[in-house]
Amino acid sequence: MGQSGGSIELRNLGKSYGDDPAVVDLNLQVEPGEFFSLIGPSGCGKTTTLRMIAGFEEPTTGEILLDGVDVAAVPAHKRRVNTVFQSYALFPHLSVEDNVGYGLRWQGSIDRAERRRRVGEALELVQLTSYAKRRPHQLSGGQQQRVALARALVLRPSVLLLDEPLGALDAKLRKTLRQELTSLHRDVGVTFVFVTHDQEEALEMSDRLAVMELGRVIQSGAPREVYGAPLTAYVADFLGVANLLAVQCLDGRQDGLRRVRLGDAELLATPAAGDVEADGHVVIRPERVRLVARGPRAVNSVAGTVDKLVYVGATTHVVVRLPQDQVVQALVVNDNDDDDLVPGTPVTVTLPPEALRLLAKTGAGVTPR
């Protein structure tokens, strides 16, 4: 069922409603067959961007290139693009197979036998063959979502747009369907553009992602890259749990690392991407923080005191209070019965320099990647 093509390029794309900008000078490129996610809080412009790619919104400025052709002025029904919404918009009076085949009925070049064959292929793809005669109200939320996916895929688009399609489902079902959606993408080979505010969904499912704020892309790249090397405090804080610490930037370097001061400790930190001007903050993820019993100070470490512990099954989140009343959270794996860490315990907190990253000052020459 996979189709050739499916590249997307957005050039200086903008959308304003009166004097209110919703998307500002957006530049993005999505490769054919890629699973690309737009992520950010409500109102950041991600859904407006998706609607412009779909043809439901007309851009104020810029170009939308699908397979190299600007379609900014092309009506939605003439684009090889289909959309799956959070509300699946299934026809309640039609069976599952009739819902899936509805769009094919308006393609005069497809006869009844071919339409039946393609509907069957789509239902098999989403594992709903045995539900073909049922009505939408006889299906679970997850099954309805799969019908909506089949209805979009049966038209053989080169690009499938997904606007928070898991948003109406409960947490357990969402997790299951994330895995199904990733497998489905791999099977069909169609370009997926996925909009979500759920950082876990974006990290788990995407080949690449873009973090948006106020209509702009702040940073884009592979999930591991954006999560592990955020450019700004906004990206670090939005995409996962982050320890943001205020530091004093010192002169001089060592092995390409920047010298910073945290309390009375001098540390080494990885420069911000592009080595642009730092904003006086470092970030480190909880899983990269190391805790040991208080002893001789190790390299890149500070003294702290355990403030609080939160047991979450496989791990314990340990909150440690540092000098100058800053706090850092560490993730400790519960792989033994060692209960030495209790509130009030003095510890040495090690912050590996490759994981301790300076953040860029906003506007200091930082460009999304």
Image: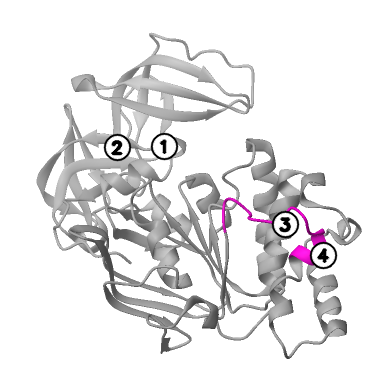
**Residue bearing the label numbered 3:** 146
In the picture, measured across the screen, residue 319 lies left or right of residue 176, that is: left
Q: Nearer the viewer, residue 347 or 122?
A: 122
Q: Is residue 211 magenta?
A: no
Q: Which mark is residue 300?
A: 2
Crowd tier of the residue under label 1, counting other residues whose Cα lies within 10 Å: few below 14, some 14–19, many 20 or above: some
Vertical relation: 82 (above or below) 363: below
Residue at x 34%, y 28% (from the top left corner): 328
Residue at x 25%, y 24% (from the top left corner): 326
Q: Nearer the viewer, residue 145 or 256?
A: 145
The quadrant the C terminus occupies is: bottom left
Given contact means CB atoms under 8 Å apart, are the residues at marks 4 and 3 in contact?
no
Q: Position of residue 224 (x, y in %)?
A: 47, 55
Tell me the kind of residue under disc 4: Glu
Q: Is residue 90 magenta?
A: yes
**Residue bearing the label numbered 1:** 241
Residue at x 55%, y 71% (from the top left corner): 34
Given contact means CB atoms under 8 Å apart, are the residues at marks 2 and 3 in contact?
no
Q: Is residue 238 visible?
A: yes
Tell me the kind of residue under disc 1: Val
Q: Which mark is residue 97?
A: 4
Tell me the kind of residue under disc 3: Arg
SS of the residue at dot 2?
Answer: loop
Vertical relation: 157 (above or below) 148: below
Q: Which mark is residue 16?
A: none
Q: Which contiguous range is marked in magenta?
A: 85-99
Q: Nearer the viewer, mark 4 or mark 3?
A: 4
Q: Nearer the viewer, residue 40 or 258?
A: 40
Tell me the kind of residue under disc 2: Asn
In the picture, measured across the screen, residue 353 lies left or right of residue 187, that is: left
